[in-house]
Amino acid sequence: MARESGVKITSICGGKGLCGRCKIQVIAGKTSPLTLKEYEGLTEEEIRENYRLACQVLPLSDLKIRVPHESLSSPQRTQLEGIEIPVTPDPVVSSYELKIDPPSFSDPEEYAEVVTKELKNCKRVSIEVLRGLIRKLRSLNWNADAIVRYGELISINPPSSRNLGLALDIGMTKIAGYIVDLEKGETLISKGVMNPQIPYGEDVITRIARASKKKKEAKRLRNLVVRALNSLIRDMCAEIKADPEEILDAVIVCNTVMHHLFLGLPVKKLGISPYIPVLKSAMDVRAGEVGLKISPGAYVHILPNIAGFVGGDHVAMILATDLWKYEGKVLALDIGTNTEICLSDHGKLTSVSCASGPAFEGGHIKNGMRASNGAIEKVRILDGRVKYNTIGGKNPIGICGSGILDAIAQLYLNGIIDESGRMKDHEMVRKTEDGKEFKIAGPITVTQGDVREVQLAKGAISTGIQVLLEESDTSMDELEKIIIAGAFGTYMDVSSTVAIGMLPPLPLNLFEQVGNAAGMGAKLALISRRKRKEAKEIARKTRYIEIAEVPSFMKIFARSTFFGSKWGFEIGDES
Amino acid sequence: MARESGVKITSICGGKGLCGRCKIQVIAGKTSPLTLKEYEGLTEEEIRENYRLACQVLPLSDLKIRVPHESLSSPQRTQLEGIEIPVTPDPVVSSYELKIDPPSFSDPEEYAEVVTKELKNCKRVSIEVLRGLIRKLRSLNWNADAIVRYGELISINPPSSRNLGLALDIGMTKIAGYIVDLEKGETLISKGVMNPQIPYGEDVITRIARASKKKKEAKRLRNLVVRALNSLIRDMCAEIKADPEEILDAVIVCNTVMHHLFLGLPVKKLGISPYIPVLKSAMDVRAGEVGLKISPGAYVHILPNIAGFVGGDHVAMILATDLWKYEGKVLALDIGTNTEICLSDHGKLTSVSCASGPAFEGGHIKNGMRASNGAIEKVRILDGRVKYNTIGGKNPIGICGSGILDAIAQLYLNGIIDESGRMKDHEMVRKTEDGKEFKIAGPITVTQGDVREVQLAKGAISTGIQVLLEESDTSMDELEKIIIAGAFGTYMDVSSTVAIGMLPPLPLNLFEQVGNAAGMGAKLALISRRKRKEAKEIARKTRYIEIAEVPSFMKIFARSTFFGSKWGFEIGDES
């Protein structure tokens, strides 16, 4: 109900009553009785105070409700700018100056011919262009720019107008958009919005399950994203005083599930081992075919996937970091709900994917929240006292990914939790009826349950890295660089990740935090044919390892859930 | 109002109150008062009997009306089968047997790849196929036919299923459809329906005016045709127990106006001299893009146009008659509301178009009707008595094109009308308050006005032929053959056309009536790549002459409206 009215309430389990993250407080009005799941998911005190799970309760009258801050999927601090690699623009669309005379008695050629005979290598005219051809040419007084893409006339523009391109990085939780001047290669504007599919499940598996249930559900998820993209496009265009129809080309990067949902391909097989996609290859579709409202003649290029859990966004990261061009052995990872990791061994690429969960996006964490104003983003325990920073310097209202990482690292380094993650009896630890918890600020605490969540995420990521290294006959010490991409990866404290054993204990100067490399890769593929071709090469040559299939997986994973010295020596040596 | 309820009332002027063909009789109920146009268009007697013009009257209550037979656009006898030219099938879609294993743990390729690596020259997969790929393959137990078109996988079919193709000839008044077995080249079924745009104007100019008025009107005309095509496709498929989705390729032929209306291109310029089309070239569009409900991956190929008034149907006629392959000089014409004429001079093609009007389709003729049951189709005056045949041997209810042609020829040959078309005083001619008329059967007459209409049609066609010959430095006697295509052209009596001077006075054995050559050409372009290429060649190399631009046009036209000896000698020598 709330979802329809635009209030975005967190849902991690996809409305199954399991995650307990969608708590709301009913202030007035009649509701359906408490469900069993609510009895399990709410404390007695919460029940007394009329707390309900939004996914379980049905209104029996108009209601007045309060949505606690932690139940809101609030806008997140996004990382839009990545490293910039200079590349000479060579977009797939080219602009040609047209100076023509209208057809006449003495020269009664067809209108399309009048235009195309002026153009070299233009063999086809898109039907969308034909439909508006006469009107457009006349309004421009027969003095226009012709936009040609691989021999097809896709647009008629005012003379010397900008050629705009669109790059989109569609993540599970957030979408980053960029409008680029295709001829100069400059980013004119970038903007991030939340993926409106979040309330339908925060992780890949929940969203696949949702979309596979009914055709209608997949369509609904698709429409949600398309609508969000069109609104993002409109907003960006408004800021640079452009019309969406001026956008002549687009590149999309996303994981394989988002790729399938966006193209209307069935996702069911992506949720069942061996997780095989319908399509891995790069795809060009007309913007209209996928519902994007840009130039009617424009095409959308979607970067190729590598496997069911490693998509075009991973390819884009490899592309943007020039990973395959390193002489030595370099690791690159993009940390998210799903973490993809790639090892380049003198250009030989091998990738794995691991389900690291939503802990670092604030999910499954009692006081977790996304990286927006008021989120605790840095934590240190100094002289027995907790110090913290919040985003925007606001009063703390919750704790975001980098904050929870810091907090757990500090608890471990200060001996408040042990290697197994158990919270010890300690002067700063208090016991509640839900178990032990450690106070950070006011009511904001880190609970034993939170520790377990981070332990899972940390375990998944370090297992991914170890399996990848093992399968590539590479020892940790051979790594010359570790590139960390993505929003969380940019803001997190590397020393904390090393402290808990999530990333390998290597000198900190080997780590490089590069921002949104996937978005950057999308932009590169947008402005450069060469880079677009390189992306295809990357997808083709990257070897994918399904980590659950590796015999040593269980052993490594079991070892990796422990904090600290699980990389072969005691933690703390380096940090 | 009637139009919406499915009653098809004739309209020639497009609802402007000018043609007086849409007479209805109001039996009961209240209506708006008579308009000026109705006072002009109805006789006093008709007004007394509550006749109204359907395009002028507005209902002020529920009405009971009678629609006289002559006001109905009734189904017409159509000419579906043309000459058959043997051609080795070589369609653009090919079928390949697939015997594949589903992807698995040991061989975890993407689904699209599993299919495409089995296929030579298949580089792309249509998104429509991808969307249903897994479902289809599984339902066929991984044993299927792959349909490939120019390197694109467009369909997955049951093994050894028929590959169906669709040919459509969209005329101004009627639409002919054919379903063809693409591999055998056999026509499985053919069917004709009326073009539902007829009530919006019977001739090209009225329809252009209608569609240029508002974008919505063009869209309405387009939707009408698309709906009729889809219903024709469904009907034909039902009869051969096929699913429309089994149709894998389609070819459309039509004149330039229908071409533009169908593709959603603006037609305004086609109604204004110098009548320049937006596009002449052949076009391939996805079936879905133009609303045709056949295989979701199928394309539609539309034959190229030659000029604003000479379209792909003319190209198809030239293709089907192999006109450009004759050694000598051969004339081919397709008689309709617009008549297109082509001269092949040892393969050099020159075409003209002339507005011959709807007289031969029963339009503008007092008792005119289309060629359906009860229409008088043959007339002779023998020993001072009128003899006639009706279609289906039914009681006469009107007179169709071939009947009116015969009647006029007989009146002229029997001296009842003179060369100028004037009806003489004669024992068989009676005078009414509307002028003279000649009784054919019961109340069915040929009026002085009817004579004038045929005179215009005859004048236009013979002018077209003469201008074409003159501009090609060809004398009539050089013609080795005259090919006559189209429904009217097939059923008309050639001797009558020669008698009135519509066609040149040449030995009757030089005339060849070939049926619906345009539809045949569509089928050829459907089953043969070579023929499709030939059609492009034909459109490219055919010289078009705008007859109104030829200096001698007015002189020739003035001369040609006379019946009889206007081809340089007295009529009757040959017939």
Image (spheres, coloured by chain):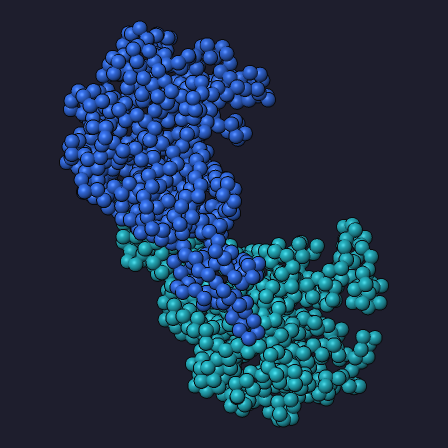
Chain colours: A cyan, B blue
Q: Is residue B236 visible?
A: yes
Towards the viewer: A465 or B523: B523
**What x and y, as percent, mark residue B353?**
28, 34
Towards the viewer: B147 or A182: B147
Q: How many marks?
A: 0
**What x and y, as percent, mark residue B348?**
20, 43
Q: Which residue shows up at 36% across the image and 51% down it?
A: B89
Q: Which residue shows up at 74% across the image and 64% down it?
A: A17
Question: Image height check: is A16 above or below B284?
Answer: below
Q: With B365 as the anchor, is A100 left or right in this view?
A: left
Towards the viewer: B450 or A314: B450
**What x and y, as percent, mark residue B278?**
34, 44
**What x and y, as percent, mark residue B58?**
52, 22
Q: With B444 as the anchor, is A257 left or right in this view?
A: right
Question: Image height check: is B470 above or below B25?
Answer: below
Quadrant containing the C terminus of chain A in the rendered view: bottom right
